[in-house]
Amino acid sequence: MKLGVVVFPGSNCDHDAFHVLHDVLGQPTEWVWHESTHIHHLDAVILPGGFAYGDYLRTGAIASHSPVMGAVKKFARAGGVVLGICNGFQILLESGLLPGAMLRNRRLKFLCRFVHLRVENTATPFTSACRPAQVLKIPIAHMEGNYYADAATVRELERHQQIVFRYATPAGEIVDDEESNPNGALANIAGIANRERNVGGLMPHPERASEPLMGSTDGLVLFQSMIASLVSK
Amino acid sequence: MKARVYVTLKKTVLDPQGQTIHRALAGLGYKSIKEVRQGKVFDLKLDGLSPDQARQQVEQVARDVLTNPVVEEFRYELDE
């Protein structure tokens, strides 16, 4: 098993993701520089949070054209497991590996706080160790997390159960208010997967909720799920 | 040769920045302004291309890089 964490200029959650995979979960993990295309030996690739290339033009736009993303597209099409967290999710959207786009948060503010997520699909490599409808307390930290897709795309996502996480109340109810869906994401969408399930992205930061010191360990289950599904592959 | 590319959010996409600017303008007394939509402008300088080639290239970068077709659209002007 070998996991890779991509480092873009401007990534700032790369060390957190590496720490959780390597130190907390004890998995062989390596860095992947944004100019590298050498990823075929990896079992999974993490696109971490941050502001890749300063988020110039649009969040994730420049990163989606970087050399490593050319390799990640091939890797994903061949069935490789790819998880995008926050900016990593935005990069997956810009790359076309996941459908939709991110708009500014509805109140135009950078939001950094805990949210509650309801697990909508446990049949993905990122949620296989979750209970159905389990509620996870995980923080968000973003300016553009207001998920948008046209109505036809959202219908497709629902039909194929590609919506993996929705913003919810602590009790797991889906309510579109400022408290439980602070960025205004369409249909409370916090995270999705592709139809094949090997590519996933979410705005909240599970790596920031993976040790008791951080106030929540609910994020750990995503990485544990991913590792378990790679082992059983 | 110069090209100017205008990138705007699609009409069907909510523009919270435009709405905020609109509210600010209304607060300043500009009651006749009924809507504000914010966009971006890119000025490109091109060299060594025929006008047809330039149009082709501008359209290509506008489509592939300068806009996200999920939420944005573009138009452009070419100054030969």
Image (spheres, coloured by chain):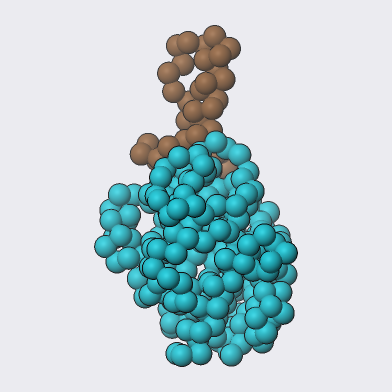
Chain colours: A cyan, B brown
Quadrant for residue A61, please give it. bottom right
The one of B71 and B78 positioned closer to us in this rendering: B71
The one of A131 and A140 positioned closer to us in this rendering: A131
Residue depicted at x 29% and y 66%: A160
Q: Where is residue A26 in the image (x, y as percent from the top left)?
A: 67, 84
Residue depicted at x 38% and y 75%: A123
Res. A88 in view: no
Residue depicted at x 62% and y 67%: A217
Res. A153 in view: yes
Q: In this view, does B13 lie above or below A3?
A: above
Q: Position of residue A54 (x, y in %)?
A: 68, 54
Q: Where is residue A52 in the image (x, y as percent from the top left)?
A: 65, 60
Residue depicted at x 46% and y 90%: A232
Screen quadrant of the N terminus of chain B: top right
Total of numbered circles in the picture? 0
Q: Is residue A56 above or below residue A119?
A: above
Q: Position of residue A161 (x, y in %)?
A: 32, 65
**Does residue A105 appear left or right of residue A212 in this picture?**
left
The one of B77 and A161 positioned closer to us in this rendering: A161
Q: Is residue A91 above or below residue A22?
A: above
The one of A110 and A104 positioned closer to us in this rendering: A110
